[in-house]
Image: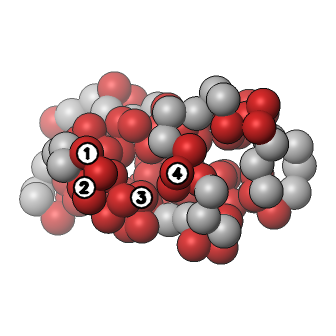
Amino acid sequence: MLTEKIKKKLLYTEYWETPYEKWGVDTWDSFFYEKYSGSKRKSRSALAVELKVLNKHLKPGREKEKVSILKHNLKCATPCILRLWGITSSRLDLSTVMM
């Protein structure tokens, strides 16, 4: 359960009020599209910012572990998609794409 102090630092508290077991990149995208109808890029950028805040302020525990998993999944999502499109890391500086 997130504390009120942490919730005040987040922009999308409604999503984070769901049980941490349901947190995921796909569930985030669904939430973001329903509420804000933005692009996948905006959704993922917003998620990256939220994860950074959570990682900084959560105490060690299951929620923080889940945040670490989400950060990893978010970082992996972009290079994997680019490989499917035939774009290699030698043709793109991936460090500028995600966190």
Disc 2, SS: helix
Read off the residue under disc 4.
14
Query: Cα distance, mark 4 to mark 1?
Result: 12 Å
Disc 4, SS: helix
Task: Give the color scheme: rainbow, by chain, secondary structure or one colour.
Answer: secondary structure
Q: Amino acid at mark 4?
A: Glu
Question: Cβ–Cβ below 8 Å for labels 1 and 2?
Answer: yes
Q: Amino acid at mark 1?
A: Tyr
Q: Amino acid at mark 2?
A: Tyr
Q: Give the residue displayed 51% in from the left and 55% down from the top.
A: 15
Read off the residue under disc 3.
28
Disc 1, SS: helix
Please report whichever mark, 2 or 3, sits nearer to the chain's N-terminal start: 3
Q: Which mark is residue 62?
A: none
Q: Residues within 10 Å of mark 3 (few under 14, many from 20)?
A: some
Q: Amino acid at mark 3?
A: Trp
Q: Where is 66 relative to 2, above or below?
A: below
Q: Residues within 10 Å of mark 4 (few under 14, many from 20)?
A: few
Q: Residues within 10 Å of mark 2 (few under 14, many from 20)?
A: some
Question: Cβ–Cβ below 8 Å for labels 2 and 3?
Answer: no
Q: Residues within 10 Å of mark 1 (few under 14, many from 20)?
A: few
Query: Cα distance, mark 2 to mark 3?
Result: 9 Å
Question: Cβ–Cβ below 8 Å for labels 4 and 1?
Answer: no
Disc 3, SS: helix
Residue 67 is left or right of residue 42, and the answer is: right
Read off the residue under disc 1.
36
Please report whichever mark, 4 or 2, sits nearer to the chain's N-terminal start: 4
Question: Cβ–Cβ below 8 Å for labels 3 and 1?
Answer: no
Q: Which mark is residue 33?
A: 2
Please report whichever mark, 3 or 1, sits nearer to the chain's N-terminal start: 3
